[in-house]
Image (cartoon, rainbow, N blue to C red):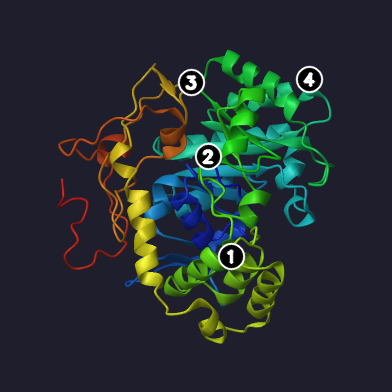
Amino acid sequence: MLAPMVRSGTMVTRLFALKYGANLVWGPEIVDKAILHAERRVDSVTGVISYVGKSQSKAMFTTHPLEKPYLIYQIGSADPELAVQAAKTVMQDVAGIDLNCGCPKPFSTHAGMGAALLSTPDLLCSILSALRVAMPPEISVSAKIRLLPSQEDTLKLVERIVDTGITTLTVHCRTRNMRPRERALVERLKEIVEFVEGMGKGVAVIENGDCLSYEDSKRIRKLTGAHSAMIATAAESNPTCFSKTPLTDLETKFTPSYIRVAKYLDAHWAVTKFCSAAFRGTHEDGTKADANALRKRITSSKSYDDITDLVGPWTGEAEFQEIVQSVESRVGRRPMFKKEEEVSLCSEETTVPSSETLQLQSTQELGAFKTPVHSLSPDPTTLRAPLLPANDARVHVPALVSGYDEPTPTPTPVGVLSPASSI
């Protein structure tokens, strides 16, 4: 899983993470009040959906229909009513809603949000309960927390959180006062996982903290029993780390492609510059000096046009279609959920029981500019469902689940079938 990261967890980074194997991607935390005043805009050429504030020059949140079945939107909130309003604002474009209960930074905690919620469990749980009641069943509700100083207090909090009806719990294995340079207390998670599984509510537990790659996630899961692992810092440096064979020479093989796709999708240059300057590789086809020179050129540039000589022809549209093909290749395996069934979780070793709530998943194929109407969440789709073969005859069922069938207003180019017409 790609962790929620302010500034780094952009749409382009999320799309590349999906291309290279991430099962779910978290967007960056956005405060509830901020999104309420945003205008939703759709680019008729690329399909990009932007939420733009009234007085802002750039979007506070962007997404693409391609990532919808895998995108978890993280809310910063200390108010159940505002959290619900924020979730309803974006729910047509995401698969799940996650409450940030773990960020220790002042911008998140100053108003009682983020890690401050760990000290107000009544408020924390009331927000999750309100979200679960307000969201349709196809929209998952989850929480991301940190460890409390004592294991006993952590388990008490976890019990209350699980009882709110969430689908997934992410545990950053550090306490609120710990910093990234300090080793994550990964060994404490095993007891938490066993405790959650013992509650029998089918909640998946994701580990966060010191997981570096797909291969490293195997170590984490074996050590903790966690159902999956979330990667933050390592993905910020190398978004291909979710692959069994991640790229190593990023400066020559990845960064130019990333910038070309970002330009095609009209990502704000300042954001693209920040993300691409953070990529770090092993310099297989070049020297460290060459890599540093590339980063210096990027960070000193004021627009995409300033680095045309570095990235070559602007072939972002073709490279974006490669991402589309990669992500779509897994859509045919998206399953329907079944009640009371143990199913595999991201690997053959670990299983977790499905939720008691009957959940249905349409296997409607997702195109570059089309999206299933309120397509059901891969959280828990990726986490809890068996991989079933594609079935073109399977009906599209959003109205059956949600009680309504209002299409998401994303553009459908000429020659591309809409979800309704392709049933």
Q: Write down the residue under mark 2.
A: 131
Q: Write down the residue under mark 4.
A: 152
- CA gap between label 3 and label 2 equals 27 Å
Mark 2 or 4: the one toward you:
4
The x and y percentages for residue 401 are 31, 35
Q: Nearer the viewer, residue 274 or 256?
A: 256
Amino acid of disc 4: Glu
Image quarter (top left, top right, bottom left or bottom right) of the N terminus: top right
Q: Is residue 43 above or below residue 191?
A: below
Q: Which residue is found at the position 83% from the left and 25% from the top?
A: 150
Q: Earlier in the sequence, mark 1 or mark 4?
A: 4
Crowdedness of circle 2 by 10 Å Cα count: few (<14), some, many (20+)?
many
Q: Earlier in the sequence, mark 1 or mark 3?
A: 1
- CA gap between label 1 and label 3 equals 41 Å
Image quarter (top left, top right, bottom left or bottom right) of the C terminus: top left
Indicate which disc residue 285 carries: 1
- CA gap between label 1 and label 2 equals 49 Å
Q: Which residue is found at the position 39% from the left and 17% from the top?
A: 341
Q: Write down the residue under mark 3.
A: 351
Amino acid of disc 3: Thr
**Is residue 304 left or right of 337 when viewed as pictured?**
right
Mark 1 or 4: the one toward you:
1
Amino acid of disc 2: Leu
Mark 4 or 3: the one toward you:
3
Q: Earlier in the sequence, mark 4 or mark 3?
A: 4
Q: Earlier in the sequence, mark 1 or mark 2?
A: 2
**Is residue 176 left or right of 90 when viewed as pictured?**
right
